[in-house]
Amino acid sequence: MFDFGFWEIMIVMVVALLVVGPERLPGLASKVGGWVGKAKRFARSVKSDIRREFHAEEMRQMLDKQQGEIQELKGMLNDAQSDLRSELDDSTHLVKAIEDQIEEVDNPDAVSAPEKDTAEHHASRSDDTKPSNGK
């Protein structure tokens, strides 16, 4: 805390001996020692408090940084999930189309409902356009 050398302390002791006297010097030294101890303890507690506050602030900053990273990872996971769902839907449609083609090859006599409706529509139109022999 204070930077006192040996000679500075000796000069202070000699001045204290001359001012206070030899009878009261041990009591004064004891009081000064107590004050110095209290000052050191106070300085140590202030340093400790400051370190704790800096550490708490660092922890808060680290926590905020990690929260940001977590949010970024969540976004990446959501994007990956939507991409996978899209690919799964595309694959499902592709499999369905392949199954329909296989079914048509295995059973060529079966006509699907839309094709049947189209065939019936063409047949009814061709009946309407035929000339009637009665007139």
Image: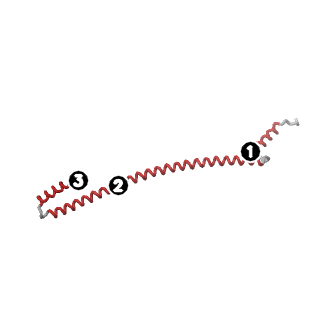
Label ID, residue 88 = none
Earlier in the chain: of badge 1 and badge 3, it is: 3
Task: Measure the alpha-carbon separation of dots 2 and 3.
Answer: 27 Å
Q: Are marks 1 and 2 in contact (CB under 8 Å)?
A: no
**Disc 1 residue type?**
Pro
Q: Residue at x 80, y 47 (%)?
A: 109
Q: Residue 9 lies in what quarter of the image?
A: bottom left
Q: Residue at x 68, y 48 (%)?
A: 95
Q: Position of residue 126 (x, y in %)?
A: 81, 38
Left or right of 19 on screen, residue 122: right
Label ID, residue 114 = 1
Q: Which residue carries the number 3 mark?
A: 3
Q: Position of residue 67 (x, y in %)?
A: 46, 51
Earlier in the chain: of badge 1 and badge 2, it is: 2
Query: Which residue reaches farthest front?
Result: 6
SS class, disc 2: helix
**Image quarter hosting the C terminus:** top right
**Disc 3 residue type?**
Asp
Q: Residue 8 lies in what quarter of the image?
A: bottom left
Task: Measure the alpha-carbon separation of dots 1 and 2.
Answer: 76 Å
